Image (spheres, helix red, strand yellow):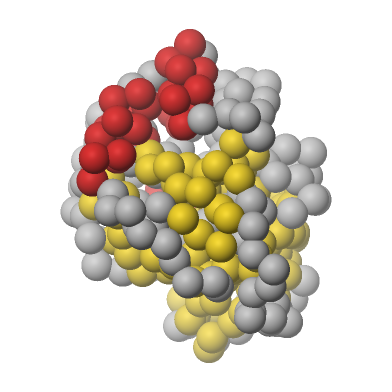
């Protein structure tokens, strides 16, 4: 969710992640990454194709599951070394391929993503109270997406489409009370994400954002309900959410390619009321 994504301690994080994961392969179409403070437990191998990616938060802090794909020939060690050399910028050979966005402790969220074969990592980019991204504290786990002939999943038809542009969200239709299947489509020039937040009464998106700034005190005035973590331009993902009446916000925390400033600082938030 936050901007310190490419912190320099990835190397240690990756080494720790390798020790905790059991060698296991997921069935086609679905897998879960369990998030703790600070690590991921999940499959070592995942079949390619349309996949429901779940994050289960068993930690005490907010977590998400950002999937990234490395270019052919690149390894998790290469990624860690690149982050150490330049913590502010992701290497150009990394693709952001989505995943389920942030949930509070005890919650889970799912994102339907099209996975392509290759070496991947799952990262948590949410910062702790000191402003250190969880990825630098151990939340980076390698996994391999293997070539698979077919997946049994059929992409559901969304009833709401959120289009991400530089730098705004555009909704295809107002969101009403009840359950919705929501597609995020990135039509911008850089990667974007959407965090869905149920705001506390009278709270604004900026109040929720401020609670994740370094040194912020107290719980955020709102509850993150998932969404889609960073996806490259021209790509998409689907999530479902249940809407009770009240105020909500969509927020993009993804850092600008050039400046590193989070997209919300360039206006990439959207507030709405569900009636
Ligand atoms: Cu964005």
Is residue 249 at least partly visible in the picture?
Answer: no
Viewer-nearest residue: 122 or 166: 122
Is residue 93 at least partly visible in the picture?
Answer: yes
The residue positioned farthest toward the top in the image shown: 85
Picture layout, residue 65 above or below residue 249: above
Q: Residue at x 57, y 21 (%)?
A: 89
> x and y percent of residue 158 in the render?
70, 78
Viewer-nearest residue: 164 or 40: 40
In the image, is 46 to the left or to the right of 231?
left
The residue positioned farthest toward the bottom in the image shown: 178
Q: Residue at x 44, y 66 (%)?
A: 26
> x and y percent of residue 252 in the render?
57, 47
Q: Residue at x 69, y 73 (%)?
A: 150
Viewer-nearest residue: 172 or 138: 138
In the image, is 244 to the left or to the right of 139?
right
> x and y percent of residue 186 in the render?
74, 52
Picture layout, residue 125 above or below residue 161: above
In the image, is 10 to the left or to the right of 186?
left
Picture layout, residue 37 above or below residue 239: above
Q: Quadrant of the image for the C terminus?
A: bottom right
What is the tally of numbered marks visible in this picture? 0
Q: Residue at x 76, y 45 (%)?
A: 233
> x and y percent of residue 148 in the render?
64, 64
Which image quarter: residue 94? top right
């Amino acid at each position: 969710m936050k901007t310190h994504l490419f912190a320099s301690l990835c190397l240690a994080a990756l080494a720790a992640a390798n020790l905790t994961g059991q060698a296991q392969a997921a069935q086609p179409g679905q897998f879960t990454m369990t998030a703790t403070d600070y690590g991921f437990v999940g499959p070592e191998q995942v079949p390619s194709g349309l996949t429901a990616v779940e994050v289960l938060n068993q930690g005490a802090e907010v977590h998400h599951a950002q999937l990234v794909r490395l270019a052919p020939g690149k390894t998790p060690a290469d990624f860690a070394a690149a982050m150490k050399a330049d913590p502010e910028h992701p290497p150009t050979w990394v693709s952001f391929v989505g995943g389920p966005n942030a949930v509070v402790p005890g919650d889970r969220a799912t994102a339907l993503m099209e996975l392509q074969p290759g070496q991947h990592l799952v990262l948590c980019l949410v910062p702790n109270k000191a402003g250190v991204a969880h990825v630098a504290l151990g939340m980076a786990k390698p996994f391999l997406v293997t070539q698979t002939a077919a997946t049994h999943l059929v992409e559901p038809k969304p009833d709401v489409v959120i289009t991400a542009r530089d730098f705004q969200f555009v909704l295809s239709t107002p969101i009403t009370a009840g359950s919705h299947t929501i597609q995020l489509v990135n039509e911008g020039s850089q990667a974007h994400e959407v965090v869905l937040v149920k705001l506390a009464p009278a709270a604004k998106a900026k109040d929720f954002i401020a609670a994740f700034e370094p040194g912020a005190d107290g719980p955020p005035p709102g509850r993150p309900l998932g969404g889609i973590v960073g996806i490259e331009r021209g790509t998409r993902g689907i999530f479902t959410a249940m809407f009770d009446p009240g105020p909500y916000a969509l927020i993009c925390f993804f850092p600008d390619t050039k400046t590193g400033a989070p997209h919300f600082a360039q206006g990439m938030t959207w507030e709405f009321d569900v009636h």
